Amino acid sequence: MLSSRFLTNSVLCLIAAFLAFGLVFPLATILVKSVQNAEGVFAGLENFRRFADTPGLAGAARNSFVISAISTAITVVLAFAYAYGVMRTRMPARALFSGIAMIPILAPSLLPGISLIYLFGKQGILRDVLMGHPVYGPIGIVMGQVTFAFPHAALILSTALAAADQRLYEAAISLRASPARIFRTVTLPGCRYGLTSAALSVFTISFTDFGVPSVIGGNYPMLSTQIYLQVVGRYDFQMGAVTAIVLLLPTVLSFVVQQMVQRRNVGLVSSGAIPLRVVPRPALDAALFLVCTAVAIFLLAILCTAGFASLVKYWPYNLSLSFNSYQFSRMPGGGWSVYLNSWILATATATIGTVMIFLGAYLVEKGEGNASLRAAMNLICMLPLAVPGVVLGLSYIFFFNNPANPLVGLYSTMGILVLSSVIYFYTVPHIMSLTALKHLSREFEATGASLKVPFYVTFFRVTLPCCLPTIINIWSYLFVNAMTTVAAVIFLYSARTQVAAITIVNWNTGGALAPSAAMSTVLLITSASVWLLRAWVSSRLARRMQAWKEPVT
Amino acid sequence: MTDIAQPYLQLSDASKSYGAFTALDDVSLAIGKSEFICFLGPSGCGKTTLLRSIAGLELLTSGWIVQDGREVTKLPPQARDFGIVFQSYALFPNLTVAANVGYGLYGRKMSREAMRKHVLDMLDLVGIANQAEKYPAQLSGGQQQRVALARALAISPGLLLLDEPLSALDTRVRFRLRGELRALQKRLAVTTIMVTHDQEEALAMADRIVVMNQGRVEQFGTAPEIYNNPATEFVADFVGEMNFIDAQTGGDGAASVGAARLALGEDHGALARGAAVRLAIRPSEIVLAEGEGDSNRVDLTVERLEFLGAFIRVHASARGLGGAALRVDLSEAVVCARGLAPGATLSVALPAEKLRLFPRG
């Protein structure tokens, strides 16, 4: 029999190496590049001085901050009202609303931009609403980012609002507090961590997003598009590296703050808490129903416009149905092969990522010995959340496209796209795995050992079946994200490995709006189908697992 | 009791520390074959760490463990011979009762039929053969406990380890299982170690009890030994109810408390005259004074009566002993006959042979 210690240690080292080569070393290369000149000689802060002196770049940094701050404020306020309506009122259609809020997650971030062009662009049907202001630029970017980031904020705030203690509200009422005072002194403090977390997440998403500004940004410079311009347009890798660091700093900062917030968030709702009983409050329920309806219609309009526009002959003048926009083979560098590439990327990312991430989390959580390596790995697993996709992509150029690197063969293959996608989306599935594993008794492994059964038998017969619902969620999370991502792969694709989301960017840049809309719709439908399939499989599984969970009476 | 000259399990100078914290401090024990041993102590005393060290789930920092003539100190759990029942039972939720019990038969050269029969025999042994196809979540707490026990016994271990196996159950089930568990252990004659923080459980079940405190063994003996002759003040305080009276040794087999003098049963010559000591006597050992001539007669002022069903516990202060607080257990009949109420006076005697003496440090 293979020594179990040897086996677990080998796998642990393998995953540690994967994280080192996929994340730590490439990021380190960016830091090095940012303080070198074009010849690779140490230049101190010279590059940063040049960055500050280049009006386009310094301006882009300012724009990114301002726009992200505005998007964050709007998103958090809307998402809080929306989540409050869904979780804390008795208004009708709450389940439907909570479902609609999640749809934007399934779309590529380019899709809101494309829809906004159709709605408010030069030939947009709602152009006059903007009173002569162009949608290309700040207005469009903010609208797109709000749409794109909304589900994340809504999800975090719903979770925060779901955890409430009825006893606190009863105590407040019995002390004769007014509803406004109760909201201020009980509700808000109860979800202040959720609010902080939502604000930081939305800021990070907006600040690093590539899709929205690349479609609707016009000539308005943003950091995430400037970095692309510096590298792909000007071959100025030094400026690229500096821009990457400017992009990285706020996200790392918000990541650190978020970790601190999370650590302080434990035990806010004690185990003895009584779940909140939500009572009808007709006036408030009606008001929030209107707010939620408006938001839901806006989200649906954004999502459906692209789909609808892609199905008509000539928007907005000839609205008769046609599949012309779906003739992808007529498009340059197109055809359905890019869609096939997307499938390969998404399937490979989901499959390899699920195995890797779950095994890694298992060893971090249940492993023995190597305590410091496991703690370090856990920290590194959290890091990808703070790394913008374009920064990760750029770091891969520096790290892998280097003749001295023995892994140079990986460059411009599908492999590097899969690697960057797995790493880019690593953190959330890692946390999902840890949560599921923590729910299992610590004694399972010890029991297996006491019964003289090798640990991997217990892993396959007990741990894995118990975590199957989580594993399915992880697989579909990775699939959907890899299917729609632009940021993680924009620097890394080659002619042979171009995926559909990239193709949309290229067509859109070339002015082919209708095919872009069509391809976005195809991606949205693909993601939605996988998501529905996941829901179906999960519910089937839940029914089968019922017997282990609930006592029969 | 078995011959301890040939112990089945022997621990020598077993120590375990986590950084600066010492969980086990030089523990040495010899346990005979087929004995039922309880590790008793407050939470954090190291009893569970000691059990897990015997299982190999923790490795000792120093010292060694010999089981059945074989040194197992550094062996992983898989290479040792034991079955364990955890406090949480750790039943695999996705496997049926039968699959849980048969889990340890993996890889044995047994026919499917023989395995099934063995599993059913085990379930029969613990009295839940009719639940074989259910999942753990569909069973009551007591039934889950039996499954965990059957699973541990299915591999016919030489040593059975029980980590607070009854503490998650409600009182009635716990009382019933206590008897069943002991009877089963006698029948199988399997050497058993049970960790518990419930002294009543330990006194009722164990052949011998290991009382632990702060990683050390305070006393190792039978239930009557532990209860009647506690080796340390800790054991005296932890097991059963005990009154403590601060005193000084007075020489000539007596102790002085303030002006009063209390005769002691045994000679405590080892202690210097005037040494600070603590006298201990159980509330049930204090008797009513017969007359003026009683030795160790003490006058009490009753402060409070506590009705405890079988008897009434009188909380009082001993005027003669500098106001020391004493508890005395009296029958309801006596309390009524004497008309005891808060403020009343009561004369009692502290029998010299029951007065235990511990050095005060």
Image (spheres, coloured by chain):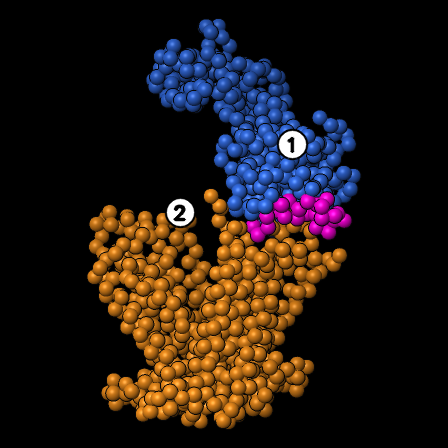
Label 1 and label 2: CA atoms lie apart by 38 Å
Q: Which residue does the numbered mark 2 point to in the structure image? A: A272
Q: Mark 2 lies on which chain?
A: A
A149 relative position to A173: left or right: right
Badge 1 amino acid? Leu
Badge 2 amino acid? Gly
**Closer to the camera, A381 or B46?**
A381
Q: Which residue does the numbered mark 1 point to in the structure image? A: B184
Circle 1: element type: helix
* Residue A338 spot, x, y in % from top left: 53, 85
B95 magenta-colored: yes
Of all chains in the rendering, the one displayed in blue is B
The magenta segment: B93-116
> Disc 1 vs disc 2: Cβ atoms closer than 8 Å?
no
Q: Confirm whether residue B23 shows in the render.
A: no
**Closer to the camera, A414 or B310?**
A414
Task: Identify whether A271 is placed above or below A412.
Answer: above
> Going 62% across and 52% down the picture, which residue do you hit?
A445
Of all chains in the rendering, the one displayed in orange is A
* Residue A270 spot, x, y in % from top left: 40, 50
* Residue B360 spot, x, y in % from top left: 54, 28
